[in-house]
Image: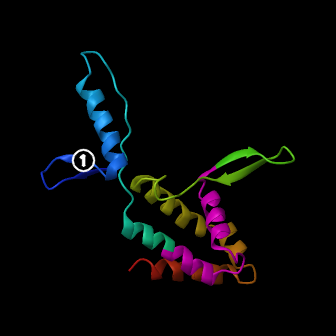
Amino acid sequence: VVLVKGDDGKLHGHGQRGERAYAKFRGRVESMQPGDTVHFDWREPRSLPHHRLFFGKLGRLEDMQEQFEDSEKLRSWLTVGAGYCDFVPGPTGRMVALPQSIAFDKLDEADFADLHAKVDAFLWTDHARRFLWPHLTTQQTYDMVDQLMTEFSK
């Protein structure tokens, strides 16, 4: 359920569905007896400016690199490279990495910030740089990542 603080200073469910879910939760909490338990998870919503920064950086990287013509494939490769993936048996029985979803509603801000940092760290690796720019020297690949990071550090 997504909650919003109303003009009355009270919490409300966001939208009709959210209001119903919040009413159900409140009812459960109010009906609790001593010793009863309830479990819920709380997530910090994703920051829109951070989301835009990450995807802007990916868009710029897509323009700079030479291996991927599809932004979804580039993002999947980076997500796997950052270790944000599941390993499952492939068609031949060998394990393959499948990227986990980074959808806006799947990752809260803390997890998204962690993923972003791990993607940045992966880009600095020799493996990633050599793969993205196979015809450049090691120094040139380093310069490409440095240029990308500099553009997005302002």
Q: Main secondary structure of the magenta part?
A: helix
Left/right placement of residue 121 relative to residue 49 reads: right
Which residue is at a point 44% across and 73% down the rendered structure image? Answer: 53
- Between residues 8 and 71, which one lies in front from this camera angle? 8
Span shown in magenta: 56-85
**Magenta region includes residue 63:** yes
The secondary structure type at the circle numbered 1 is: strand
Identified by mark 1, the residue type is: His
Tell me which corner region of the image, top left, top right, bottom left or bottom right, holds residue 45: bottom left
Which residue is at a point 30% across and 40% down the rendered structure image? Answer: 22
Q: Is residue 42 visible?
A: yes
Q: Position of residue 38 (x, y in %)?
A: 34, 26
Which residue is at a point 53% across and 60% down the rendered structure image? Answer: 118
Q: Is residue 122 above or below residue 129?
A: above
- Name the residue at the front extreme: 16
Q: Position of residue 23 (x, y in %)?
A: 28, 37
What residue is shown with label 1? 12
- Between residues 29 and 17, which one lies in front from this camera angle? 17
Left/right placement of residue 22 relative to residue 115 reads: left
Q: Position of residue 67 (x, y in %)?
A: 72, 76
